[in-house]
């Protein structure tokens, strides 16, 4: 009984202390719940990441997901979104022995607090309270141990390869861990009291403390540059700061970021889903500059810089909505990120696809940074070296392979593409003769053709904007290569072999795991809409607006023709299903907005409201697929506000039903963009009339220039659709 009372008292203390951390939060910060989506639909869950917006040090407890009631360790830094962490530690009250590092600690959901700038949990087995708060290149752990018990902090490495931890005189420590094979990450820190080293061997070590004090702090800094820079980061940022000061500064930083958008109306659940999505949009990219320098995984050396250098971007996920959202909220930061891409090209010889700390991760397919650069250029973002960027984009377009998960010199398959206008596929069961084709990712022939057609369209558009007319003549026809795989009878993009013959497949299910022989993570029904760059032509291919609208309707109603478990055994990314539509994967994001190009724009309003309400609940299951560090959350932010960048590269937004009665976006230029829908509610989801700056809208769209000039979108809402409004 006494033991139980101690645990309950400790839990009360955790709650009380954490409650003190959040009582002064503005409403929009209180609405953030980092545990939303913490149990993945089938694949990866979200993580309750603690960090400053777009900064280097990220933290999340190590466990399988939110259903796992044990924590294995706490990282001092998550180096890259889902690609690993460094410097494992955990507190302990048990005698240090060989089994100490295998111990997992039980935690309780109700005794954990997750804020973007502060984390706290209670380890029930050892009765230890753990707290964490983050700086830019630094962090502070605080441990509260039970009275009269031994105190120890155990250290280990997450990654194989050379790593070490060293105890320095007094209370100081330093370490190095090798991440992803060749990247050295350095750490320098100080405890609040002097430890006694125990069981030290390489990176695995124990710090034992003998004082009677129950509370122990560890301040530390991370560097990718050098051990000396780690110490410098420590001295500059954290050495003279307290835990309370760090927590307050973190909350202030998130207040500035999240407070750019204020909403009124909607339900509390909708506000929680919205603001949590907005918070996740600041998980990456991350600024890795340290005193005018940074370690580059592209040149494999330390580089000098006079502006921030960012890494950790997955452009296949982020070009759709994440980059466009940042172009609204933080155009200066976006310009720094684009200049980072330029530097990566200069240092490595290729424009990257998934740039991370160690270099280009080269995931998925396509060179979608081309679309991002076009989008930024047309939205007035100019503070980066466009000439060098263009050279990099052009080189990728003519000299790099389009093979998935590769960023290197072209292959004979690419020469075939440039000559014939499509990527050739293999028949089912046919052996792959090209060695460079990834054994798991396959050719993805249809997805590669469609994705690179969009990229080449963007390059042609950019060439025209820059006066490079000869390049426009080269790339504009390639922007229409999607037509070469359109099957006019089946109304789908289907594969062809290298002789130009159609390959007969079940477009719902064939193509191996994730459909990768022909598509990528999704089936042919999802890829039937991948022509954002030329929607009028896509409509024409489908037989006109009426047929196009009917085909969209069919998408949301079409059967899987098999059980869900059979379907998901091959398409685990295609979650959040409504018919053949998959809300849980990025290629689907723009599809519900295509109704705005038909005679029934009200169906966009119906679909987006339904999708938000169905698949983005404010609970641990509230993300329908891999959230991808802001890639999916940006869709939620846009759709909830009532507009969406349907075609990145065309500086225009298409309108849908906002879930809020009022949205205000405070822009960097000092102006405010507003959306007013005073009657909006769960029932009143249909737009009756629309005005922009007081003038009626006949077409449900507005330009980026209208937005950044501080425009005002006014929507009259009602319970029934206005079937004439915006009808094309």
Image (spheres, grey):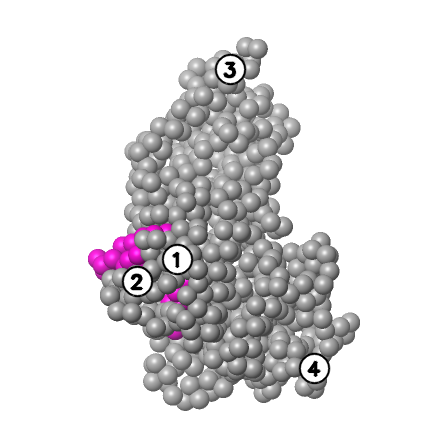
- x and y percentages locating residue 534 in the rendered image: 47, 78
Q: CA distance from mark 1 to mark 4?
A: 48 Å
Q: Which mark is residue 718?
A: 1
Residue pictured at 51% horizontal, 78% vertical: 545
- Can residue 533 be seen at all in this image of the molecule? yes
Q: CA distance from mark 3 to mark 1?
A: 55 Å
Position of 477 with respect to 651 (left or right) is: right
Q: Are marks 1 and 4 in contact (CB under 8 Å)?
A: no
Q: Secondary structure at mark 3?
A: helix
User: Height in image: 360 above or below 15?
Assistant: below
Q: Which mark is residue 502?
A: 4
- Number of residues whose C-alpha sits closer than 10 Å to that of mark 3, classed few (under 14), some (14–19) or many (20 or more): few
Which of the two labelled residues, at mark 3 and mark 4, occupies the earlier sequence position?
A: 3
- Number of residues whose C-alpha sits closer than 10 Å to that of mark 1, classed few (under 14), some (14–19) or many (20 or more): some
Which of the two labelled residues, at mark 4 and mark 2, occupies the earlier sequence position?
A: 4
User: Is 656 included in the stretch rendered in magenta?
Assistant: yes
- Work out whether residue 63 or residue 286 is closer to the camera in this orientation and state it: 63
Q: Are marks 4 and 2 in contact (CB under 8 Å)?
A: no
Position of 695 with respect to 681 (left or right) is: left
Which of the two labelled residues, at mark 3 and mark 2, occupies the earlier sequence position?
A: 3
- Front label number (3 vs 2): 2
User: Height in image: 133 above or below 379?
Assistant: above
Q: Which residue is mark 3?
A: 6
Query: Farthest residue toward the front?
Result: 720
Determine which quarter of the picture holds residue 564.
bottom right
Q: Are marks 3 and 4 in contact (CB under 8 Å)?
A: no
Q: Secondary structure at mark 2?
A: strand
Q: Which mark is residue 713?
A: 2
User: Height in image: 246 above or below 458?
Assistant: above
Q: Quadrant of the C terminus?
A: bottom left
- Work out whether residue 134 or residue 460 is closer to the camera in this orientation and state it: 460
């Amino acid at each position: 009984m006494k033991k139980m009372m101690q645990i309950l008292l400790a839990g009360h203390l955790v709650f009380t202390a954490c409650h003190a951390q959040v009582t002064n939060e503005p409403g929009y910060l209180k609405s953030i719940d980092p545990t939303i989506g913490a149990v993945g639909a089938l694949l990866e869950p979200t993580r309750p990441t603690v960090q400053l917006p777009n900064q280097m040090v990220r933290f999340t407890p190590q466990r399988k997901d939110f259903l796992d009631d044990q924590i294995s360790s706490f990282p001092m830094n998550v180096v890259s979104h889902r690609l690993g962490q460094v410097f494992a530690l955990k507190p302990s009250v048990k005698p240090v022995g060989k089994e100490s590092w295998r111990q997992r600690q039980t935690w309780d959901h109700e005794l954990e607090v997750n804020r973007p700038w502060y984390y706290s949990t209670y380890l029930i087995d050892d009765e230890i309270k753990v707290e964490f708060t983050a700086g830019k290149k630094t962090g502070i752990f605080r441990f509260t141990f039970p009275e009269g018990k031994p105190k120890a902090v155990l250290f280990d490495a997450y990654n194989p390869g050379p790593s070490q931890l060293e105890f320095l005189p007094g209370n100081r420590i330093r370490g190095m861990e090798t991440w992803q094979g060749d990247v050295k990450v350095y750490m320098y820190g100080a405890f609040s009291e002097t430890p006694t080293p125990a069981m030290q061997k390489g990176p695995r070590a124990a710090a034992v403390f003998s004082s009677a004090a129950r509370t122990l702090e560890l301040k530390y800094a991370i560097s990718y540059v050098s051990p000396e820079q780690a110490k410098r980061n420590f001295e500059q940022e954290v050495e003279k700061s307290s835990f309370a000061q760090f927590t307050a500064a973190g909350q202030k930083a998130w207040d500035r970021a999240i407070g750019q958008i204020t909403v009124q109306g909607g339900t509390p659940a909708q506000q929680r889903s919205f603001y949590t999505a907005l918070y996740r949009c600041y998980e990456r990219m991350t600024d890795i500059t340290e005193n005018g320098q940074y370690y580059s995984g592209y040149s494999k050396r330390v580089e000098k810089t006079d502006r921030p250098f960012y890494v950790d971007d997955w452009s296949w996920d982020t070009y759709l909505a994440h980059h466009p959202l940042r172009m609204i909220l933080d155009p200066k930061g976006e310009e720094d990120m684009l200049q980072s891409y330029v530097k990566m090209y200069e240092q490595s010889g290729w424009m990257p696809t998934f740039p991370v700390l160690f270099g280009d991760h080269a995931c998925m397919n396509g060179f979608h940074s081309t679309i991002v650069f076009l989008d930024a250029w047309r939205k007035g973002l100019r503070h980066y070296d466009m000439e060098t960027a263009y050279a990099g984009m052009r080189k990728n377009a003519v000299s790099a392979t389009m093979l998935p998960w590769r960023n290197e010199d072209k292959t004979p398959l690419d020469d075939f593409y440039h000559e014939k206008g499509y990527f050739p596929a293999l028949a089912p069961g046919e052996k792959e003769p090209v060695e460079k084709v990834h054994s798991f990712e396959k050719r993805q022939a249809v997805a590669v053709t469609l994705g690179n057609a969009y990229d080449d369209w963007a390059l042609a558009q950019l060439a025209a904007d820059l006066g490079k007319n000869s390049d426009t003549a080269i790339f504009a026809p390639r922007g229409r290569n999607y037509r070469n795989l359109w099957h006019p009878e089946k109304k789908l993009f289907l594969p062809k072999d290298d002789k130009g013959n159609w390959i007969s497949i079940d477009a719902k299910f064939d193509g191996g795991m994730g459909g990768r022989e022909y598509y990528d993570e999704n089936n042919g029904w999802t890829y039937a809409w991948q022509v954002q760059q030329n929607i009028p032509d896509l409509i024409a291919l489908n037989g006109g607006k009426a047929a196009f609208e009917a085909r969209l309707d069919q998408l949301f109603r079409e059967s899987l023709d098999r059980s869900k478990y059979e379907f998901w055994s091959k398409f685990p990314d295609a979650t959040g299903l409504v018919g053949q539509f998959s809300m849980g994967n990025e290629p689907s994001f723009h599809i519900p907005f295509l109704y705005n190009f038909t005679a029934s724009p009200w169906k966009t309003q119906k679909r987006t409201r339904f999708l938000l309400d169905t698949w983005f609940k404010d609970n641990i299951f509230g993300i329908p697929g891999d959230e991808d560090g802001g890639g999916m959350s940006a869709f939620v932010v846009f759709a909830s506000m009532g507009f969406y960048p349907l075609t990145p590269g065309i500086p225009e937004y298409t309108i849908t039903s906002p879930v809020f009665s009022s949205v205000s976006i405070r822009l960097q230029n000092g102006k405010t963009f507003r959306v007013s829908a005073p009657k909006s509610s769960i029932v009143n989801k249909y737009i009756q009339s629309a005005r922009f700056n007081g003038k009626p809208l006949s077409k449900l769209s507005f330009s980026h220039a209208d937005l950044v000039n501080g425009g005002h979108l006014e929507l009259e809402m009602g319970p029934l659709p206005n079937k004439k409004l915006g009808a094309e």
